[in-house]
Image (cartoon, helix red, strand yellow):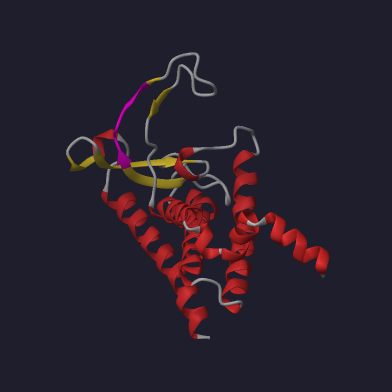
Amino acid sequence: MNNYLKYFGIAFLVIAIDQAVKMLVHFQMDFGTPGQIKIFGDWFKLHYTTNPGMAFGMELGSEYGKMILTSFRLVAMFGIGYYLHYIIKKKQHPVYTVCISMILGGAIGNLVDSVFYGVWLNNAPYDAPTPWFHGQVVDMFYFDIWEGYLPSWVPLWGEQYTALWPIFNVADAAIFIGVAIILIFQNRFFPEHSKEKTNPEHVSEDHIAS
C-alpha cells in the first residue's frame, strides 16, 4: 500500500506543480511577447503562450484533431495508470517506476488543460471560450536558441516561422525526462531482455532444450 501511495503520489505532485505554474502564468503574466520575462539573458525566458496540440507544440491538423487528441490523452491516462499499478505490484525497478509516475503525471497535467481550460480560462488561444475537451495547453518555458523562417526545402515546416526549441511546460518536461531516463537506462530496467539480445544463440538452445 505504501508503494502505491508513493508512486501515485509522485504523479499527483507532478500534476500539482504543473497546474500551479500554469495558473500563476495565466493570472500573473501578460500573453505573448509583451509579458515575456527573461530568466537567463536572452536564451531562457518565461513566455506565456498556448497550443492546441501535443507536447512541445505539435498538433493534429484536422477539424476533429483537438477532440481526437483529447480523447487519446484520456485513454492514455487510464492505460498508463493501470500499467503503473501493474509494475508497482510486480515490484519493478524503482527508478523505472518513478519514470512511469512522471509520465502519468505529465499526461494528466496536459489533459486537464485540454478538457477544462477552454471553459474555465477562456484560453483558446487567449480570452476566447471553446467547448469542453477543446481547451488550449498553457506553455511557458522558452529556450530561445534560434528563431526565424526555415528554408522552403525543409519538409513540413519549410517557409514557416519557428523556434529551434519549442515552448513547453512542467507536464511536457516530466514526460520528456521520464521517457529519456527509460531509454538511457533500459538495460538496467530490463536486464533479462538485454541478455536475450546479447546471447540469442543461448536463448534458442534453452528454448529447444525445454
Magenta region: which residues?
Answer: 142-148
Looking at the rendered structure, the number of numbered marks drawn on it comes to 0
What is the quadrant of the C terminus in the image? bottom right
What residue sits 48% from the left and 72% below the top? 94
Taking the view exactly as shown, the residue that stands out farthest to the left is: 41
* 146 within the magenta span: yes
What residue sits 51% from the left and 71% below the top? 93
Query: How far across and down, in percent of the image, does residue 146 sit?
Result: 31, 28
Of residues 165 and 97, the one nearer the viewer is 97
Query: How far across and down, in percent of the image, does residue 58 sit?
Result: 51, 37
Of residues 201 and 147, the one nearer the viewer is 201
Q: Is residue 163 rendered to the left or right of residue 128? A: left
Q: Is residue 60 rendered to the left or right of residue 106? A: right
Query: How far across and down, in percent of the image, does residue 207 sit?
Result: 79, 64
Query: How far across and down, in percent of the image, does residue 153 sit?
Result: 50, 14
Of residues 37 and 24, the one nearer the viewer is 37
* 154 within the magenta span: no
**Residue 139 drawn above or below residue 209:** above
**Residue 45 drawn above or below residue 76:** above
**Residue 67 drawn above or below residue 160:** below
What residue sits 54% from the left and 21% below the top? 155
Taking the view exactly as shown, the residue that stands out farthest to the top is: 152
Determine the image quadrant of residue 16: bottom left
What residue sits 56% from the left and 46% below the top? 134
Of residues 53 and 103, the one nearer the viewer is 103
